[in-house]
Image: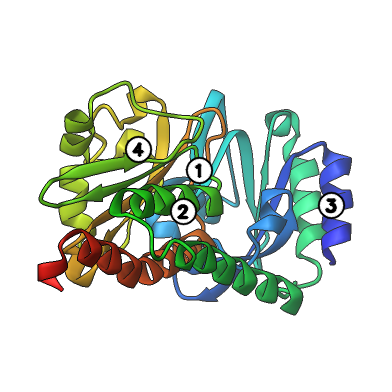
C-alpha cells in the first residue's frame, strides 16, 4: 500500500496520524510508512515494545486504546489525545488523533488489515531528504565560525532549536565564567541564569559522553524546575559539547503547545550539530583566551 493509499485510509477514518510498524528483529519495530506524523517520521521511529507498555499491550491482546482529555505520550516521540494500536500478525498499525476513540473495534481491525496488506519500504527519496536535513543543520552551525563566544553559543542554540523545530534551545558553557545562552524562540523559562544553570547541571553530567533523550519530562528523573514538565516543557534532547562534553552542553526542548518527542532523525541531527560545533566553539574560546591557544 502506498503512502497515498494510507493517506486516503486515514482520511476515511477521520484520523490525523497513521503509523505502520514492521518487525525488523526480535523485540524491535520500525515505522516504515504512514500518514501525518507516521509518514513524516517514516524510517525515524524505532520502538521496543518491552519498553513501551501500551504497545506491548496491543501486541499481547491484539488491540489497545488510549484516550485522555489532554496530549499524552503514546510511544517513542509520539504524543496524542487519543490513539489505537492494532496488531495484524505482520504489522502493528497505530491510529492517532481526535476521534480515534470513537472508532469501533471491527472498523479498526479492518482498517489495520488494509494498511498491512502490502509491506511498505522507506522510499529512497525520503532517505535522501533526511540526509540533506542533517547536512543543512550542520552547515548552519559551521557558518557561525569567527564570531564571539557569546554569538557562537547563542547562534548554536538557535540553529539547533530551528533544525529540530523546538520551542526552547540553550547552550550551557562551563567557563570560567559559566554561561547559559538561550535561543530567542517562543518559550523561555521564568528564571535567572543561575536557576537555569542549576536545572541543567544534572543533565550535563548525564549528557557528557552520550545523547540524552527524555521523551516525556513528566516521567524524567532529571526534569528539574524551571525546565520541567510543570513549567511547560514536554520533552528534551541534550548532548555534551567538546571532548567528553568538556566545553559545555547543548539542549533543546519541545513545549506543551505542540507536544512531541525526538525521532531518530532528530537525534542524528543533534549529534551532527554537536560534532560540527566543537571546532567552532574551540575557535571562539581561543579568541577569548589567546594565551590558551
On the image, the x and y values in percent for residue 66 come to 56, 34
Q: Secondary structure at mark 2?
A: helix
Marks 2/3: CA–CA distance: 31 Å
From the image, state whether disc 4 or disc 3 is nearer to you.
4
Who's the residue at 31% across and 31% down the image? 228
Q: Is residue 19 above or below residue 261?
A: below
Q: Which mark is residue 166?
A: 1
Callouts 1 and 4 close, C-beta under 8 Å? no
Q: Secondary structure at mark 3?
A: helix
Q: Nearer the viewer, residue 82 or 113?
A: 82
* Residue 213 can be seen in this image: no
Q: Secondary structure at mark 4?
A: helix
From the image, state whether disc 1 or disc 4 is nearer to you.
1
Q: Which residue is mark 3?
A: 7
Q: Quick check: 177 left or right of 286?
A: left
Q: Which residue is mark 4?
A: 217
Amino acid at each position: 500500500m502506498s503512502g497515498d493509499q494510507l493517506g486516503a485510509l486515514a482520511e476515511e477514518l477521520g484520523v490525523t496520524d497513521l503509523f505502520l510498524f514492521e518487525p525488523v528483529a526480535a523485540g524491535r519495530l520500525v515505522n516504515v510508512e504512514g500518514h501525518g506524523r507516521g509518514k513524516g517520521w517514516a524510517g525515524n521511529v524505532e520502538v521496543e515494545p518491552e519498553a513501551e507498555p501500551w504497545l506491548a499491550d496491543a501486541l499481547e491482546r491484539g488491540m489497545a486504546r488510549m484516550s485522555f482529555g489532554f496530549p499524552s505520550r503514546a510511544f517513542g516521540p509520539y504524543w496524542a489525545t487519543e490513539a489505537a494500536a492494532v496488531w495484524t500478525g505482520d504489522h502493528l498499525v497505530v491510529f492517532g488523533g481526535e476521534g480515534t476513540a470513537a472508532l469501533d473495534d471491527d472498523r479498526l481491525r479492518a482498517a489495520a488489515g488494509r494498511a498491512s496488506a502490502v509491506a511498505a519500504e522507506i522510499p529512497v527519496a525520503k532517505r535522501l531528504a533526511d540526509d540533506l536535513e542533517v547536512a543543512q543543520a550542520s552547515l548552519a552551525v559551521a557558518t557561525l565560525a569567527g564570531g564571539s563566544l557569546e554569538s557562537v553559543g547563542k547562534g548554536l542554540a538557535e540553529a539547533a532549536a530551528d533544525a529540530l523545530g523546538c520551542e526552547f534551545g540553550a547552550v550551557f558553557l562551563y567557563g570560567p565564567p559559566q554561561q547559559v545562552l538561550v535561543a530567542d524562540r517562543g518559550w523561555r523559562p521564568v528564571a535567572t541564569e543561575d536557576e537555569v544553570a542549576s536545572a541543567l547541571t544534572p543533565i550535563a553530567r548525564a549528557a557528557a559522553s552520550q545523547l540524552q533523550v527524555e521523551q516525556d519530562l513528566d516521567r524524567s528523573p532529571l526534569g528539574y524546575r524551571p525546565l520541567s514538565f510543570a513549567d511547560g516543557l514536554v520533552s528534551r534532547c541534550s548532548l555534551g559539547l567538546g571532548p567528553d562534553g568538556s566545553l559545555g552542553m547543548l539542549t533543546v526542548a519541545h513545549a506543551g503547545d505542540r507536544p512531541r518527542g525526538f525521532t531518530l532523525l532528530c537525534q542524528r541531527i543533534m549529534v551532527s550539530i554537536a560534532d560540527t560545533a566543537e571546532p567552532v566553539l574551540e575557535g571562539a574560546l581561543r579568541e577569548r583566551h589567546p594565551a590558551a591557544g
